[in-house]
Image: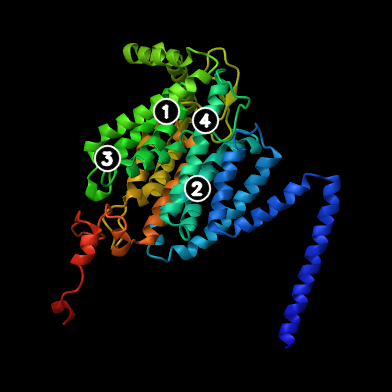
């Protein structure tokens, strides 16, 4: 009875405190109307922090909302970084338990890669601030991009502990569509051909689209038949990039190189590639025809096509973008020649490669940015860290089929990242961390769920789970269940 009495007193005390807080908030909202929205938002954030999906929503949704929203360290960005730090620390702590599971152990190399990346950032931060004399705030702003890549690893592992494969795909579709639309709105406005009243929506990232395009190809062309919905989804992502006149959007098609392979390995057969390209091209043309009349310059797209033809026939030097990129490479190599071992560090501002340009920035549109920023040693450490993070895409889970569709999705994204080196450093794109997050989240959720034969019966296109080193049989899951039922002799 006394315990019940104590519980009742605690309940009453909490109710009284909550009532006082609500009354104070009500009176304060009269003087400060923004509290009406701030308090529920804070309550929702506190609730979300306690859930793996909520922590991913805070990390990814916040990145989409605050990055590129303003220059410098605004109050909104500082609040986001504080929240991101909290959710990442929670995920890191929880990863200790996940590493003891069978599926979690497969991601130990990825965690080591994330730790190595943090060490690299600390080294480059020290070089920039102590040796080069860069302000601490500048070096921190430059390094946050790489810290977010490292943070994505434990967040993905922790998120996969409760999320299934379908929910991860839904989250991926939402994030990639938001990034694609933001890309189109921002760059059309920057080129002065947008008829919209807004100039930006959220983070405009082409790297974030890499996993979306790869996932669409695998789900659209893998297995039996062709799933048109997924191919049209890919076409929409590509159209959002190509309508801006960015030829770099074609790099996203490199995902096909990463996903092609034998059907028994849950990859896209080469025989379906042409069909996939035809469907995507038709969807892109249709989307561009619908959007083109809304551009303020009727000849904008045609001018970009003409420039592309000029590059293919007479070389990149005839194109303004190619000329600027060549100058950027020269600036980066000059910086590396001066500091070949550890580079110039974080926070260094490079000159504008645009002829007559006066702006300076932390990055250049060239892969030589790695050497300039991290030096030879740092660049080697960076690629080792990234290779460790990508290791799960090539691992095999015991008692599952030799390969999972999610592994093909990540290798497709990897192909895009490698192809992007032609144009620049993919890791300098703030959306790269979101791509890493979604790739590892897909893989971890797939490894954790361990589909049984009964699960596969609902999806006959899937492969049979077979022991590591065993033969992979492409037979119907329904037939497999019938085939594996114990015989009378076996019962004996």
Label 2 or label 4, whichever comes before in sequence order: 2
Name the residue tied to disc 3: 260
Q: Which residue is mark 2?
A: 150
Q: Which residue is mark 4?
A: 183
Disc with the residue nearer the chain's start (1 vs 4)? 4
Residue at image location 46% in from the left, 39% down from the top: 378
From mark 2 to mark 4, how far is it between C-alphas?
24 Å
Element type at mark 4: helix
Q: Earlier in the sequence, mark 1 or mark 2?
A: 2
Res. 74 visible in picture: yes
Q: Quarter of the image holding residue 285?
A: top left
Give the labeled residue for mark 1: 249
Front of the two marks 2 and 3: 3
Q: Is residue 228 left or right of residue 88?
A: left
In x, y percent, where is residue 276? 30, 34
Q: Look at the numbered disc 2 and give the secondary structure of its residue.
A: helix
Find the distance from the CA under tag 3 to the CA under tag 1.
Answer: 20 Å
Where is residue 333 shown, x and y percent of the image? Answer: 45, 25
Give the class, few, some or many, for how many residues have Cα within 10 Å of label 2's Cα (few <14, many ≥20).
Answer: many
128 or 30, which lies in front?
30
């Amino acid at each position: 009875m006394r315990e019940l009495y104590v519980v009742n007193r605690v309940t009453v005390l909490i109710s009284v405190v909550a009532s006082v807080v609500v009354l104070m908030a009500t009176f304060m909202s009269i003087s400060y109307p923004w509290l009406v929205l701030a308090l529920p938002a804070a309550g929702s954030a506190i609730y979300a922090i306690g859930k793996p999906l909520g922590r991913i929503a805070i990390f990814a949704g916040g990145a989409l909302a605050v990055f590129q929203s303003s220059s410098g360290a605004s109050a909104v960005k500082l609040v986001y970084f504080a929240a991101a730090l909290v959710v990442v620390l929670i995920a890191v702590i929880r990863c200790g338990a996940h590493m003891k599971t069978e599926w979690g152990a497969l991601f130990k190399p990825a965690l080591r890669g994330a730790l190595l990346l943090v060490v690299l950032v600390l080294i480059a931060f020290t070089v920039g601030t102590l040796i080069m004399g860069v302000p601490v705030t500048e070096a921190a702003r430059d390094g946050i991009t790489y810290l977010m890549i490292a943070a994505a690893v434990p967040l993905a592992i922790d998120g996969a502990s409760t999320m299934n494969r379908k929910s991860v795909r839904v989250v991926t579709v939402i994030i990639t569509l938001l990034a694609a639309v933001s890309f189109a709105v921002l760059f059309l406005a920057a080129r002065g051909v947008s008829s919209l009243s807004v100039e930006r929506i959220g983070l405009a990232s082409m790297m974030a689209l890499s996993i979306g395009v790869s996932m669409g190809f695998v789900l659209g062309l893998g297995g039996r038949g062709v799933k048109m919905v997924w191919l049209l989804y890919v076409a929409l992502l590509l159209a959002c990039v190509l309508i801006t006149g960015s030829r770099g959007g074609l790099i996203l098609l490199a995902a096909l190189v990463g996903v092609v392979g034998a059907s028994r390995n849950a990859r896209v057969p080469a025989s379906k590639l042409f069909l996939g390209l035809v469907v995507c091209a038709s969807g892109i043309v249709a989307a561009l025809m619908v959007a083109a009349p809304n551009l303020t310059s009727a000849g904008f797209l045609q001018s970009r096509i003409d420039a592309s033809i000029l590059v293919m026939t007479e070389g990149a030097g005839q194109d303004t973008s190619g000329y600027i990129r060549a100058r950027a490479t020269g600036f980066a190599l000059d910086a590396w020649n001066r500091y070949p071992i550890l580079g110039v560090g974080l926070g260094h501002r490079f000159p504008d490669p645009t002829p007559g340009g006066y702006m300076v920035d932390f990055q250049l549109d060239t892969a030589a940015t790695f050497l300039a920023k991290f030096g030879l040693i740092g660049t080697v450490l960076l690629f080792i860290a990234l290779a460790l993070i990508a290791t799960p895409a090539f691992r095999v889970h015991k008692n599952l089929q030799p390969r999972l569709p999610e592994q093909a999705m990540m290798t497709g994204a990897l192909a895009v990242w490698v192809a992007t080196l032609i144009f620049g450093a993919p890791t300098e794109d703030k959306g790269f961390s979101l791509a890493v997050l979604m790739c590892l989240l897909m893989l971890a959720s797939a490894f954790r769920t361990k589909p049984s034969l009964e699960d596969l019966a609902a999806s006959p296109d899937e492969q049979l789970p077979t022991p590591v080193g065993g033969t992979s049989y492409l037979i119907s899951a329904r037939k497999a269940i019938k085939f594996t039922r114990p015989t009378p002799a076996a019962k004996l």
